[in-house]
Amino acid sequence: MDIAFLGGPQPQRGVGVVAPFDFALDRELWRWVPDGVSLHLTRTPFVPVEVSLDLARLISEHQTLREAVRALIAVGPQVVAYACTSGSFVDGTAGERAMCEAMSRAGETGAGGLPAVTTSGALLEALTELGARRIALVTPYTESVTRSLEGYLAEAGIAITGREFLGLTRHIWKVPYRDVVDLARQAVVGAADCLFISCTNLPTYDVIPQLEAELRMPVISANQVTMWAALRRLGAQAVGPYQQLLMASQPRPPATAVLPEVLSEAFSEALPPGGPPVLPPVLQDPPPFPEQEGQT
């Protein structure tokens, strides 16, 4: 069979992803990616350190980022994303911006720097999109790492209304959904605009719709905002059922639609000769029930 008529494959559109060495949720990232876009993942070198502020700094060193991006650009991604929350908030907002600049320069071509985003930068972008300034917070981290995230958010003008954390230093990807839901319920106190579930190694895809329905507020997570922001830079939409962040950023049809005229014309053509049918009297004006006679 000759398949030359298919003309494919289509030109590749790719997102390069730099993840920590212990990242275990590749499949979860893919669930937000629409058809026609590929993910190209690479990992930072292994270091024998548990999840902590020290580890966050080690896996976000600029030399580590540059080497990871250089490995990715061989396959020509159009944007690069650093998929780690703690590694991108550990040195504050200035540190996050410096990470983006380092990755962008490492991927520079004749057309300029490669667009770059980090999880913590994407978080602030998503909060702006949602108009959220007061948030509830859930993390799997220790207290010290959680407080570092709070400091990053405070620097950006975001207030924390409530927080819960698990205190884990390893195997975060093994946390079941029920634990995430329980922590979320406990964290949402006060007048929060939004709930953020931190850590790209914490599974969240399937709990977001349930929590949004129950808590009556947007719920965003580390992996969700990373993919949402990276795909935005491609001009693509992240996909996912009943997730307010994704629905908030979808393009809306123009208000001055011509649908009424189109429908009117189609309806007129469908009418039988002589105009619309005359309905039987019972359908035109049903008589009142006996108990309704004399009432207005």
Image: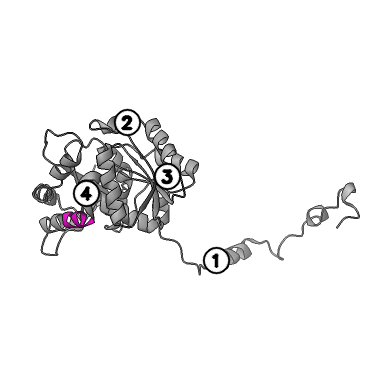
Q: In whole angstroms, how far apart are the C-alphas of marks 3 and 2?
A: 22 Å
Q: In whole angstroms, how far apart are the C-alphas of marks 1 and 2?
A: 53 Å
Query: Percent x, y for residue 67?
Result: 8, 48
Q: Nearer the viewer, mark 1 or mark 2?
A: 2
Callout 4 amino acid: Ser
Query: Percent x, y for residue 33?
Result: 31, 47
Q: Quadrant of the C terminus?
A: bottom right
Q: Is residue 282 visible?
A: yes
Q: In the rendering, which numbered label is found on residue 88?
A: 4
Q: In the rendering, which numbered label is found on residue 113?
A: none
How many discs appear?
Answer: 4
* Extent of the magenta region: 93-99
Q: Which residue is mark 3?
A: 241
Name the element at disc 3: loop
Q: Which residue is mark 1?
A: 262
Question: For mark 2, does the 10 Å Cα neighbourhood hold few (<14), some (14 to 19), or many (20 or more) residues?
Answer: some
Callout 2 amino acid: Val
Q: Quadrant of residue 200?
A: top left
What's the residue at 49%, 46% (across, down)? 216
